[in-house]
Amino acid sequence: MIASSYELIALVIAMLINFVLTVYLVKEKKKNQLSKAFICVLSSLVLWTFGLILQITLSKPLNIEPIYFDYFVYIGACFAPVAVFFLGLIFANTKIEFKKKYLTLFIIPITSLLVLWTNDYHHLFYENYSVDFQINEYGPYAIVHNIYSYILLAIGLLYMLRFSIKNAGFFSKQSLLIVFGISIPVIINILGTFKITPMSIYLTPITFTIAILFCAISIFKFQFLAVVPIALQKIVDQISDSYIVLGEDNEIIDFNKTLLDTFRLKSEDIRSKNLIDFLQKEYNIDIKRLEQGIKDTKNLKGIVSYEQKFEIINKYFMVEISSISSDKASLGTLVLLKDITQHKDDMAQIESNQKVLMERERLASLGQLIGGIAHNLKTPIMSISGAVEGLEDLIKEYDESIDDPLVNSQDHHEIAKDMQSWLPKIRAHIEYMSDIITTVKGQAVALSNTDNSSFTIGELVKRVNILMKHELKNSYTYLNVMMKADENLSLRGDVNSLVQVVNNMISNAIQAYGGKRNQNIEIEVGKEENYVIFSVKDYAGGLPKEVQEKLFKEMVTTKGKNGTGLGLYMSYSNIRARFGGDITVETKEGVGTTFNIILPI
């Protein structure tokens, strides 16, 4: 059988198509595995078709047996099925790791070439060679070669078909192109192999070229070489969030593996079921928000989100509902379930830890308060006790002098005058104790309550002096107050909280000196525009740079195990929340630190 001119033209066109596509892909700067597999398939087809063209055009003029051209043709024909297999495998997985076991795929193609090239000695490949399938008689090994080649081709093409349908749907343009392309060589080769219709060997590479051309169109036109459409299902199966795609009647038409794993479901448990009915029946949750959310998104009102707990699996989810739309028409609904269980647990743990730290700080403040009370009340009580003893002596003296004829009225007046001299001293100590009790009472209440009332700058400074007197004396530290604003200037807020903030800064300054005696801490009270600024300054050497960067943003301390960092952190929170003010810091390593409490008047 001599090839017709139509077959020759078809082979030339097929070779040119394969060659152009090969050159196009080779010239691409960024080639992924799928591109490289495609280049291998096209290169095999170029060799295949080019060898057959040489056979048609040169066999008769050069008087060369056609079978000898097959020695070259089969280089492409033997390796094309392997290339198609890898094309399908990579298409399904986006990227593969080339393992040693894959080398076994090349054993039969290489063996086929060796058997073919030595066919004259054993006729295992061809018993009677002809370009016509009707006359062609294969040897026993050719059967092995053909079965192996068809299996590889089938697997590779089915991979492409299966994952095209899975990712884009059976009736998508991509899938239909691949289905149509695959059908042509399969049908024609089956008809030719079983000698149902006349067929020459030239039709095989032509039909495979048509199949690859259709695949190429689907790949390049619809970007099948991109990672997203190729491995779309793999990607959505690997994301940590569950998703459900609903149809018009809220039936479940798609979902990912994460959903099945999270809710311990099988695909058949939910596919095609109504989501609303399923959730009501299986999970007994309130579906009103879900129904309303789906309704709103179908009307293209944007994304609806809310928290939902599924009691059965003891998990919290952030439910996000959005519309799948095209040209302002709703095609379906996407329900995204973000697992926030760990986040909820972490927040609960943080809240619990914060309460513990705040309780520790409260107890520390209470301990400091009690120490101040003990010290501040001890001196006036001892003074009053001394006054009582003095009065007792005067009363005894007076009592004994009543019947004494030597004691005249002038003496009585002298005794009364001595008694009266003790009263101002006792009164002063009582007033001092009263101030202490008032201040302490306010601070004790501040540990559990807040009071939003007016107070003066002078009142604030007085309370600070009273409460810090004991700690300053014990540390041999001097507090110098510089009043550069009217002490009668009124502020509004919780004075007890502000006292606690200032005291905390003074305590920090004392501890910054590390036990050094006769050190100074300055408090400067000034006014700038509509703000009062309380500046607490020490000369203890400043703060390290790493501490400066974290200040007010997190709980940081320079006291090591002796501090939590909560005091300054809470001070900043108090000033921001209760006064609408701010705290700034100025520090210089080796010199000192100034904390500025800025309050609006």
Image (cartoon, rainbow, N blue to C red):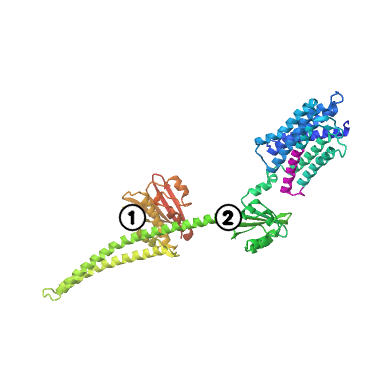
Picture coordinates of residue 146 (x, y %)? Answer: 78, 35
Q: Residue 7 appears in which quarter of the rendering?
A: top right
What's under tag 2, amino acid-wise? Ile
Secondary structure, mark 2, is loop
Closer mark to the observer between disc 1 and disc 2? 2
Picture coordinates of residue 68 (x, y %)? Answer: 81, 26
Picture coordinates of residue 196 (x, y %)? Answer: 87, 40
Quadrant of image for the N terminus = top right
Q: What stretch is highlighted in magenta?
A: 150-172
Secondary structure, mark 1, is helix
Q: In the drawing, does residue 217 fall left or right of residue 393?
A: right
Tell me if mark 1 has few (under 14), some (14-19) or many (20+) residues whose alpha carbon lies within 10 angstroms of its own.
some
| Residue 167 forms part of the magenta stretch | yes
Q: Name the residue under label 2.
A: 340
Label drawn at residue 76: none
What's under tag 1, amino acid-wise? Leu
Q: Which residue lies furthest to the left in this view?
A: 406
Query: Looking at the image, can residue 484 be seen?
Result: no
Up-down relation of residue 593 to residue 351 (above or below): above
- Front-most of residues 133 and 494: 133
Q: In the drawing, does residue 398 fall left or right of residue 311?
A: left
Picture coordinates of residue 132 (x, y %)? Answer: 86, 33
Q: Name the residue under label 1.
A: 472
Q: Residue 94 appears in which quarter of the rendering?
A: top right
